[in-house]
C-alpha cells in the first residue's frame, strides 16, 4: 500500500474539495486528539469520519485492512492500559497485577479513539487527494516545493521498499534460511541478510528517481507551472473557517469541562 | 549539423578501475534513428546518461573529452536544463513513475519547464495519443502493465518536446507485438516530427531494418558506426561483442553459404527477407513449371 495506491479514483464532493481543506482538517484533528479526552465527542467524530471516508468510494474491504493497521495499535493500548492504570472505583476485573476498572477502561478507549480519529483524518486526505494536489496544497500552505515532492515520493516508495523486504525475506526463507527462529537478539541478527539487499535496492531506486527527476527537467526553471492548479471555492473557504473555529472551540470546552459524558 | 556531438570522451565512475567509456566520439543528427547496441557492460547506459547531461551534472566521476549539446558544452547547462533538448527514458520505468495518475505523470516534465497550463494540456493529450495510451489518462501508473508503463515513461519524455529522445533498453518489458508497435511509433516520430531517436538495446531483431545508423559498443569503446548493413558485417563479429545477431541475418548467412542466394541478396530485417524469399520461391515455382 502506498500513497499512490491509496488514492481512490472517483469524483466525489470530498475529492473536489481543495486539498488545503483536507490537510488543515487532518492537522487540526491530530492536534485536537492530543487535547481531547471526551469519549462521546471522540466517538461521534470517529463515526462522522468513517462516513466521510466511505463516501470517497473506497471499498470497505480495502479500508478495513488500512484501518486495522492502526486499529491493532489501538487495541494493544486498550489491552495493556490496565497494567499501568489501576485507578477507579468500579472494578470490572481484578487479577492482582491486571486490574480493569470502568474508569481506566474508558480512559484506554478514549486513547484508542484518539489514535483512530487521528488516523482517519489522514486516511480521508490520502483516499481523496492525488499526489500532485497534495503537494500543491502543502506548497500553497507554505511548504517548499522540494520538501513537498520529497514527502510525496517517500510516501510512494517507502511501502514499496517494505514489499521488497518481504519479497527478499520470502526468497531467503524458501532457500532454507530461518529468519524468525531463536530469541529476540538472534532474530535481529537473522534479519541482517534481509536488510542488506533491501538497502541496496533502496539506494539503486533512489539513484533512479533522482536521475528521472533531473532528466524530466526538475530544477530547470525557477518558476514551476501547474497543469491543474488548485483554487479555493466558497465551499472550501466555509469549511476551512468551520474547522479552524470549531476544533479549537471543542478543545477549550473540553478543557473547561463544559462537555461531560 | 549535429545536435549532440561527443568528442573523445572517457568516463570513469568513482572507485572503479576500468573506465565505463574510453575515447568515444559520436554525433547525433536531426531526425535520425540511431541504434546503440552492445552486450553487457558495453557502456550503453553510461553513454545514454551522458547524452542527457546526467553525466556530468548529476552523476560524478572522472570525465575527459567534450560533450556539446545544441551548440553548448553540457556542463554549462543548469541541472535539468538539458531536458528541454534531450529527453531520456531510463531502463527501469518503475523508478520514473511517481505520481497518482497517468496524466499527472506526463504533465510533470512540462510543469518543471514552466510551460503554461493550456499548452501542458495540449502536450499531454498529444504525447498520450502518440503512445496509444490516451484511454489510460486517468488511471494510476501502478495499475498498468509493464508495456503500458514503458509507453507512459516515453510519453512523459515526449511531452517535453525534446529534439532528441534517448531510450535506454525500451523493449525489455514489451511483448513482440508491443515491441513492433513501439518501433513503428519511434520511426514515425523521427521521420514526421524530425525528432532524433537513440535506442540503446542489446536485442536488435525488431528495429535493425528501420535504423538510419547503428553504433556498436564494446567494453566502453565505440567499435563502429554506420548504416545497418555496414555496421553489422557478420553475425560472428556481433557475437564477439556479446550481441545476439538478428535471426534473419543468421538465416541470410546460412543461405549464402549454401549458395541459395548471392551476397548481394543478403538481408538483415523482415521486409528485405520477405522480398528475397518471395523472389526465391517465385524462381523455384518458375523452375518447376
Image: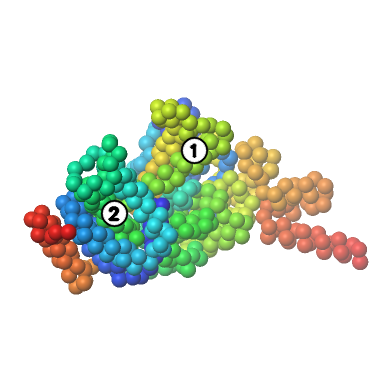
Q: Earlier in the sequence, mark 2 or mark 1?
A: 2
Residue A70 lies left or right of residue B32; in this view the side is left
Q: Are marks 2 and 1 on the same chain?
A: yes
Q: Nearer the viewer, residue B223 or A139?
A: A139
- Kindly identify which residue carries mark 1: A169
Residue on which the image places disc 2: A116
- Residue furthest left as drawn: A256
Q: Is there any visible trace of residue B31 in the rendered image? A: no
What residue is rendered at 62% in x and 46% in y? Answer: B231
Count up the numbered dots: 2
Q: Find residue B58 and report its horizontal and vertical position in percent.
A: 36, 41
Given residues A31 and A102, the one toward you in this image is A102
Give SS at disc 1: helix
Q: Residue furthest bottom?
A: A234
Q: Nearer the viewer, residue B283 or A74?
A: A74
Mark 2 to mark 1 CA distance (whole Å) = 30 Å
- Contact between labelled residues 1 and 2, with CB atoms less than 8 Å apart: no
From the top left corner, tell me how far across and down residue B185 is, in percent: 53, 62
Looking at the image, the residue that sits furthest to the right is B289
Q: Secondary structure at mark 2?
A: helix
The residue shown at (33%, 70%) is A12
Q: Position of residue B165 (x, y in %)?
A: 46, 54
Picture quadrant where residue B111 is located:
bottom left
| Residue at horizontal 49 percent and vertical 47 percent from the top | B91
Q: Is residue B146 visible?
A: yes
Few, some or many C-alpha atoms within 10 Å of disc 1 (few <14, some 14-19, many ≥20)?
A: many
Q: Is residue B177 above or below residue B52?
A: below
Subunit of label 1: A
Q: Position of residue B7 (x, y in %)?
A: 44, 40
Q: Residues within 10 Å of mark 2 (few under 14, many from 20)?
A: many
Mark 2 chain: A
Give above or below for A86 relative to A220: above
Amino acid at each position: 500500500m502506498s500513497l499512490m495506491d491509496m488514492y481512490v479514483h472517483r469524483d466525489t464532493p470530498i475529492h473536489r474539495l481543495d486539498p488545503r481543506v483536507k490537510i488543515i482538517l487532518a492537522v487540526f484533528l491530530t492536534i485536537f486528539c492530543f487535547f481531547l479526552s471526551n469519549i462521546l465527542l471522540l466517538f461521534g467524530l470517529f463515526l462522522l469520519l468513517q462516513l466521510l471516508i466511505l463516501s470517497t468510494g473506497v471499498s470497505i474491504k480495502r479500508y478495513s485492512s488500512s484501518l486495522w493497521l492502526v486499529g491493532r495499535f489501538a487495541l494493544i493500548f486498550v489491552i495493556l492500559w490496565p497494567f499501568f492504570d489501576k485507578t477507579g472505583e468500579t472494578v470490572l476485573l481484578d487479577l492482582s497485577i491486571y486490574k480493569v476498572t470502568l474508569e481506566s477502561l474508558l480512559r484506554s478507549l478514549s486513547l484508542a479513539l484518539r489514535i483512530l480519529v487521528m488516523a482517519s483524518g489522514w486516511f480521508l486526505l490520502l483516499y481523496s487527494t492525488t499526489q500532485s494536489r497534495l503537494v500543491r496544497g502543502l506548497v500553497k500552505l507554505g511548504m517548499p516545493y522540494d520538501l513537498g515532492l520529497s514527502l510525496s515520493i517517500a510516501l510512494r516508495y517507502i511501502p514499496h521498499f517494505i514489499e521488497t523486504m518481504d519479497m527478499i525475506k520470502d526468497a531467503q526463507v524458501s532457500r532454507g534460511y530461518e529468519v524468525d527462529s531463536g530469541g529476540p537478539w538472534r532474530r535481529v541478527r537473522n534479519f541482517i541478510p534481509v536488510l542488506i539487499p533491501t538497502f541496496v535496492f533502496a539506494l539503486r531506486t533512489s539513484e533512479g528517481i533522482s536521475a528521472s527527476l533531473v532528466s524530466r527537467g526538475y530544477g530547470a526553471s525557477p518558476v514551476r507551472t501547474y497543469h491543474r492548479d488548485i483554487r479555493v471555492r466558497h465551499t472550501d473557504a466555509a469549511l476551512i473557517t468551520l474547522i479552524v473555529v470549531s476544533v479549537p472551540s471543542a478543545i477549550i470546552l473540553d478543557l473547561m469541562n463544559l462537555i461531560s459524558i | 549539423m549535429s545536435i549532440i556531438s561527443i568528442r573523445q570522451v572517457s568516463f570513469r565512475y568513482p572507485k572503479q578501475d576500468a573506465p565505463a567509456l574510453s575515447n568515444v566520439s559520436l554525433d547525433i543528427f536531426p531526425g535520425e534513428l540511431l541504434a546503440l547496441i552492445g552486450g553487457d557492460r558495453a557502456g550503453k547506459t553510461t553513454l545514454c546518461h551522458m547524452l542527457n547531461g546526467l553525466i556530468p551534472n548529476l552523476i560524478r566521476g572522472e570525465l575527459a573529452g567534450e560533450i556539446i549539446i545544441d551548440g553548448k558544452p553540457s556542463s554549462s547547462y543548469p541541472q535539468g536544463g538539458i531536458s528541454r533538448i534531450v529527453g531520456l527514458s531510463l531502463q527501469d520505468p518503475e523508478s520514473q513513475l511517481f505520481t497518482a495518475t497517468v496524466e499527472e505523470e506526463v504533465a510533470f516534465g512540462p510543469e518543471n519547464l514552466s510551460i503554461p497550463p493550456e499548452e501542458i494540456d495540449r502536450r499531454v493529450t498529444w504525447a498520450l495519443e502518440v503512445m496509444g495510451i490516451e484511454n489510460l489518462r486517468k488511471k494510476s501508473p501502478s495499475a498498468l502493465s509493464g508495456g503500458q508503463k514503458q509507453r507512459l515513461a516515453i510519453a512523459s519524455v515526449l511531452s517535453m518536446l525534446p529534439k532528441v529522445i534517448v531510450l535506454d533498453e525500451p523493449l525489455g518489458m514489451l511483448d513482440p507485438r508491443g515491441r513492433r508497435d513501439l518501433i513503428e511509433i519511434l520511426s514515425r516520430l523521427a521521420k514526421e516530427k524530425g525528432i532524433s531517436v537513440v535506442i540503446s538495446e542489446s536485442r536488435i531483431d525488431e528495429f535493425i531494418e528501420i535504423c538510419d545508423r547503428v553504433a556498436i559498443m564494446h567494453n566502453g569503446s565505440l567499435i563502429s558506426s554506420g548504416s545497418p548493413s555496414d555496421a553489422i558485417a557478420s553475425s560472428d563479429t556481433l557475437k564477439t561483442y556479446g550481441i545476439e545477431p538478428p535471426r534473419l541475418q543468421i538465416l541470410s548467412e546460412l543461405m549464402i553459404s549454401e549458395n541459395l542466394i548471392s551476397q548481394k541478396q543478403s538481408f538483415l530485417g523482415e521486409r528485405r527477407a520477405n522480398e528475397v524469399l518471395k523472389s526465391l520461391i517465385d524462381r523455384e515455382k518458375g523452375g518447376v513449371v
